[in-house]
Amino acid sequence: MKPIATSPSGTENPNAPAHSPRGSVWLPALLLALFAMQSLWFIRTQSLTYDEPAHIIAGVEAWQQGKFEHWNDHPPLGRLWLTLPLAGRGVEFAWEQLPVGFRVTAMRPGPEWLAWQTRPMNTLLGVALGLGLWFVARRLFSQGAATLTLALFGSTPSLIANFSLATTDGIGALFIFLTAFQLVRWRRNPSGAQTAVIGVALGGLLLSKFYAPPLVLLALALMLVLERNEVVLSPLNWNWRPAFAAFVIALAMLWAGYFFHVAHLKVGDGEVVASFPNRAVKAWATKSTARVNALVPAGEFLEGLREVALRNRRGRPAWFLGQVYPRGGIKLYYPVAIALKWPTIVLLLFFASLILGVRKTCRAPSDLLVMSLFGVVYLVFALQSGYDIGERHILPLYPFALLIAGGIWEHARKQRWAVGILVLALCLNAADALRYGPGYLSYFNVFVKPTESWRLLTDSNLDWGQGLLALRDYERQHPNETLQLAYFGSVEPSLYGVRATPLAPGEPVGGTVVAGATCLSGQTLDDPTGYQWLWSYPPRQVLDHALWVFDTDQKLQSRVQRQYH
């Protein structure tokens, strides 16, 4: 007789499928291997992006000098993990601070070697997230749904790209999902061991990104009120002890992540003076009349949190649908980024699963709801952000969306034709992603013409400085061609062997000009119109989906120059 599925409470749930046998793991292993292969393809063909050198330098300084100083706008866990292979290696960097941003002028060993030492560490985190998604989908739905979810995961360009870079967006997405999953595991078995695990997950989340505190508070609040099969409304009956224990463990992990540093904070006489281990004293003016003299464990965390809050309040220039917004804060930015940069198949399956009723086929619909709360709360905070510079900032939404999308298998598996449609959809999704491979970072869906993508979104959506290897290959294929380069990136192009002459904004020239999409938009320039003179020329070629090649003949150039001035 076919077994009857039950809900986590032990009652029969006739709408949920029976638990699938363990079966073979070869298909999930194959899908994870394909994800890793695409990641390695990306690593081999894409130059270091704008943020990567900062993460690498900061990670090496933490390991080798025990300090958390430069670019302290990210907690250290991701950087420490990425640079673990460099902890005892002799690496050197030289960089200069620019009015806006920075430029790396030398690194030893070279950038390609550094990429191979650091980026695969992030790929391992991506594989871990894919494996976690498979286990969660299998637990909530079935093995078939888990396989569908993992197949979508392995063909999602943004996930491939952001788990192939030496950056911290991936580890943030991983720990949010792990925290959400561990919370529902704790709810079913609130033992001391499970409490300790969720405390570790919360500590890892705090050490991953500075957007973590609201999500940590959400997790602790849910720990207080959630029982196995109900929500407790009376504060007298809340789970105070396990929530407090998890919070203490998280704080201990946070302190350990900063090597148990203790900062000295002194406030008074209109000045704040902060001293941190292994770095110079930092002071700034304050209007506060309070007088404080205190020792602060993991003071660098509070310093970074304060800096991120101030930057978010000031905002940052953003390019959105053909217009520069000097301070960002565009309410529709992320919804439009999802519509343009999330694979169409993923969006269709996500909404179809919701409409058909994902809760009806979920073995533990309350667990799915609790986990999804983390994605909803994260999205609410993202919409209030002044940092509208890349769809990567909503990367943590992907696991929850893919989990719900994969749930559609429970409807489709009942009809052979529906299964056939899902298989076709997976093939189309993979083909759609491969249109941009290996330049997955620049992916836009099928409704966006690749040559026109820069008119919609730029920065890390499209051109984050990753095209130097493609430009070097172009120069080798055209040895007699002189190039002028307008480049958005933090690495000196010559470190990759690129010979092109830098082209300053506001200087129209004749000949072959290669311009990054972010330069064309002007979003990061003091004068956003600096390269708009190139808009009059049709591009001859696009390199790596990120660098536009123009032929600017002298006659037309003179006319453009007169119009520009």
Image (spheres, grey):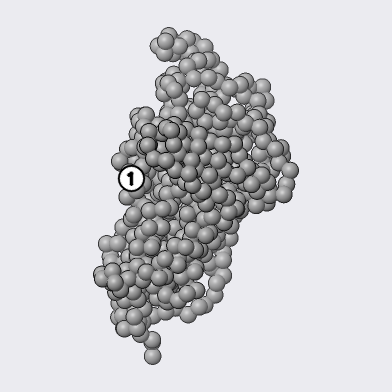
Q: Please tell me which residue lies in front, 517 or 296.
A: 296
On screen, 308 above or below 345? above
Q: Please tell me which residue lies in front, 527 or 273.
A: 273
Image side of residue 478 versus residue 125, left or right? right
Q: Locate the C terminus by quadrant.
A: top left
Location of residue 452 in the rendering, given as x and y in whole percent from the top left corner: 41, 33
Location of residue 194 in the rendering, given as x and y in whole percent from the top left corner: 47, 72
Image side of residue 123 versus residue 17, left or right? right
Residue at the bottom extreme, as displayed: 1
Pointer 1 residue: 383
Q: Secondary structure at mark 1?
A: helix
- Residue 279, image quadrant: top right
> Does residue 174 appear in this view?
no
Residue at the right extreme, as displayed: 90
Q: How many marks?
A: 1
Location of residue 234 in the rendering, given as x and y in whole percent from the top left corner: 26, 71
Location of residue 358 in the rendering, given as x and y in whole percent from the top left corner: 31, 67
> Does residue 552 appear in this view?
yes
Q: Residue at x 42, y 76 (%)?
A: 189
Q: Locate the N terminus by quadrant.
A: bottom left
Question: Badge 1: how crowded within 10 Å, few (<14), some, or many (20+)?
Answer: some
Q: Residue at x 55, y 41 (%)?
A: 275
Q: Please tell me which residue lies in front, 96 or 286.
A: 286
Q: Please tell me which residue lies in front, 191 or 82.
A: 191
Q: Residue at x 45, y 25 (%)?
A: 525
Amino acid residing under circle 1: Leu
